[in-house]
Image (cartoon, rainbow, N blue to C red):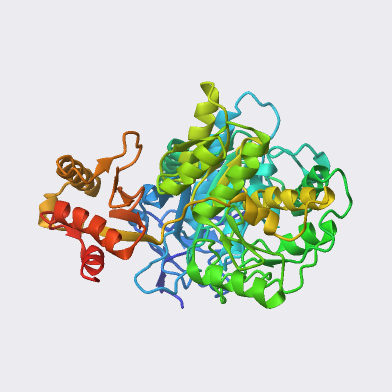
Amino acid sequence: MEGKVLQNFNVVQSCYQQNKQFKTRNQREPDQYISALLPCPRGKLALNPKSSMRVHTFSKYLTAISKQRTFYCNAALSSATVPSLDKIDFLKLQNGSDIRGVAVTGVEGEPVSLPEPVTEAIAAAFGQWLSHKKKDESRRLRVSVGHDSRISAQTLLEAVSRGLGISGLDVVQFGLASTPAMFNSTLTEDESFLCPADGAIMITASHLPYNRNGFKFFTSDGGLGKVDIKNILERAADIYKNVSDENLRKSQREISSIKKVDYMSVYTSGLVKAVRRAAGDLEKPLEGFHIVVDAGNGAGGFFAAKVLEPLGAITSGSQFLDPDGMFPNHIPNPEDKSAMEAITKAVLDNKADLGIIFDTDVDRSAAVDSTGREFNRNRLIALLSAIVLEEHPGTTIVTDSVTSDGLTSFIEKKLGGKHHRFKRGYKNVIDEAIRLNSIGEESHLAIETSGHGALKENHWLDDGAYLMVKILNKLAVARAAGKGSGSKVLTDLVEGLEEPRVALELRLKIDKNHPDLEGRDFREYGEKVLQHVTNSIETNPSLKRAPVNYEGIRVSGFGGWFLLRLSLHDPVLPLNIEAQSEDDAVKLGLVVASAVKEFNALDTSALSNLTHSS
């Protein structure tokens, strides 16, 4: 391989500089930012024949030769296709309040956008951001890092740890963990577990395919928002761009501490205590209950053995508890039809009292009662609303924009609460609940139809496991009070919820390259579509626009409603329709089809399929 030009290498901690004047090889401490070093400005590296090579999937060591000097390191060739230096666009990795990208090859047309060097730069940038936020602290800061079951998890864990070290922060590795546990580690006060952490990073891409991965960031104030994520990515781009600058390479840094802790034992212990406390400190308040868990081969397998069994529950029939980042059984997503069918089948086959299903990183969940009735989307919100409004009468329930009219009626007319329908995006919903409390409007629950749900009593953390604990509490309390057993107590709580016979979501894609956009951003085009639809329905007496609406346009008519909005991140206008019959759903679809027919950059094929189906 002598003389061959190689790409996609990454310099890490153990580098050697040959001093030609003295003809000695001196090991030195790695410079600040050195472990994020990418290929030289031209994006290529020459292999030195003196270096040792180890070929495997992800790069860890390299040899870099330049005209000025030679660095000698262990080297490894990466099989992943990594973007060259001038093609990295860090801001495109932002996904609302998360960071997401492609971490491994394997899907055609999806090149790697989150290789180790990019990951190191992002982690270093978070370290910079956190150090600035806590600049008044005189001690060394520490950051906890965990991951879900993805196949790229361990590689990115190591890269994140190196990146944090670049910023001089100590690292506490949790290994396989849940997103809620990572936030919780910034609140726990237990030095034996190196808590509280000053910040936390969860390596996850939720329910996305196996080749994806990403990051969520936390401090004790909660998850970082969009503005902070953009700031971190801008810092990361700067670190990445300037890594080969001579001044940066001459700067020294201290070796940071990396320790491993079994924090999940702390987190699960807290869940167990919450159920026992609700049931009057009974040791096994779920004794006799048969509850099956479906973790979808994500990070939620702990819930059966570490939470339910200590509480006395029978968990036989639980499935897909072992972590497997290829997700061979079904997508770990409580909104996915095949996933819900899997947990429903498990409940019925095992004659269980309850089924519980989690997404990959356990910040979302859903349930199934003993008859196979699903508690997800509107029904899950109704159930949690009933539980919360028993504890806090009259409180405001904050949801996302696609919740049903029947849910509003249930919350306000049957439960005596207030329904505040806001925007899509779990962080939007949570932040709105926090805002309402700050201006004197009491809110104790913020929840999305996706299964993201956060409670004021739980520090506004969207925690799928804690949502299930609230449901388990209800079972345990009913059992302790002799008011029945099984999941009927839960089913009774949602009695009276009006549900549509037809519920659809169609995605109308915007062709960003269509001449009609005239070079404009797709968002501007999408807003133009929404305004035109708004104008078109004003003269139709059969339709009524929602007087209070925070996202897109929501219209009632023909015994149902539709919501047309612009996606948070993609060039798509999602259209949600709910109706009491297919004919009424088609009528609503025809209203939208007529209003958008002149927008040629909009793919309305899904809408055409609906309107021509009857």
Query: Most extreme residue toward the right, as rendered?
Result: 283
Looking at the image, which is closer to me, 14 or 579? 579
Looking at the image, which is closer to me, 90 or 36? 90
Q: Measured from the top left, where is residue 279 in percent x and y?
A: 82, 46
The picture quadrant where one finds residue 26 is bottom right
Q: Is residue 224 something one can see in this rendering? A: no
Looking at the image, which is closer to me, 592 or 137? 592
Q: Please count the marks in the image.
A: 0
The picture quadrant where one finds residue 594 is bottom left
Q: Is residue 578 something one can see in this rendering? A: yes
In the rendered view, does 310 fall on the left or right side of 599?
right
Q: Measured from the top left, where is residue 63 in percent x and y?
A: 51, 64
In the rendered view, does 297 fall on the left or right side of 85?
right
The residue at the point 55 percent across, 30 percent down is 132
Quadrant containing the C terminus in the rendered view: bottom left
Q: Measured from the top left, where is residue 412 in percent x and y?
A: 50, 37
The residue at the point 31 percent across, 64 percent down is 582
The residue at the point 57 percent across, 35 percent down is 130
Q: Measured from the top left, where is residue 355 in percent x and y?
A: 66, 65
